[in-house]
Amino acid sequence: MKWLFLSLLFIPSFLFAQNLNFINNIVECSDSIQTSYSLDNKIPKELIVAQAIIESNWGKSRFAVEGNNYFGMRTWDLTREHLKPKENPDSKFGLLVYSDLCSSVEDYIKNLNTSDKYSQLRRIRTIELTLWGKVSALALAKQLENYSEERELYIRKIINQIKNINLK
């Protein structure tokens, strides 16, 4: 019994270290990718980390482990390398497979910066930069209703995650 109690004391610190490592890896990729971006093309790292946490379950999802897909990025072009959802193997889409974590982060940033689905996010980013010279991850998170079928619930999850992580 004493051994069980002592072993349980170490689980939280191990998980904390694992989660901190996950966050650091996402941030390192984000910083490296966005280093040459102008401010009006940058995505706040808090938003990137929050979505990676939610979409990949801290990097533990099947799509993250087998395909380096940390953002649930889909493709309907099934000639591209992809993984099908196990619960829906006949789906008309697959989840993209990336060579590494940073390739996933880069494609996610490109998606937010170019897809018509996120034109409002880009508009809010421009307004924030014009008014305050910086961009709030929380303000941009509110523009992600098209990112997930959960829509408003998804936005609340992302906002809560942003509030729970501290990247300062």
Image (cartoon, rainbow, N blue to C red):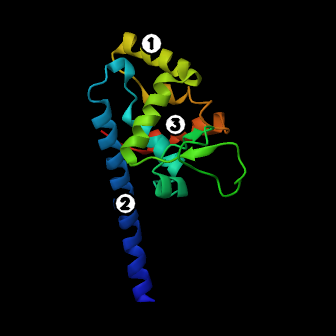
Quadrant assignment, res 104: top left
The residue to which callout 2 is attached is 18
First-in-chain label (3 vs 1): 1
Within 10 angstroms of label 3, few (less than 14), some, or many (20 or more) residues?
Answer: many
Label 1 to label 2: alpha-carbon separation: 36 Å
Mark 2 or 3, closer to the camera: 2
Q: Position of residue 5 (x, y in %)?
A: 43, 81
Alpha-carbon span between mark 2 and mark 3:
22 Å
Residue where numbered disc 3 is placed: 159
Please tell me whether mark 3 sits on a helix, a strand or a loop: helix
Residue situated in front as seen by the camera: 91 or 1: 91
Q: Secondary structure at mark 1?
A: helix
Which numbered marker is on residue 75?
none
x, y (%) of residue 51?
49, 41
Residue name at image x 33 percent, y 16 percent: 133
Is 39 situated left or right of 140 in this image?
Answer: left
Residue 82 placed where, x, y %?
A: 56, 48
User: Which residue occupies 42% across, 26% down?
Assistant: 136
Q: Residue furthest bottom?
A: 1
Identify which residue, 43 or 96, lies in the foreground: 96
Q: For mark 1, what is the residue?
A: 127
The percent position of residue 163, horizontal first and vertical second, equals 45, 40
Q: Residue type at mark 1: give it.
A: Ile
* Residue 37 versus residue 24 in the image, above or below: above
Upstream in sequence: badge 2 or badge 3 = 2
Residue at image point 73% right, 51% down: 90
Give amino acid for label 2. Gln
In the image, residue 58 sits, relative to residue 40, either above or below, namely: below
Name the quadrant of the C terminus. top left
- Hey, what amino acid is under mark 3? Ile
Q: Secondary structure at mark 2?
A: helix
Q: Earlier in the sequence, mark 1 or mark 2?
A: 2
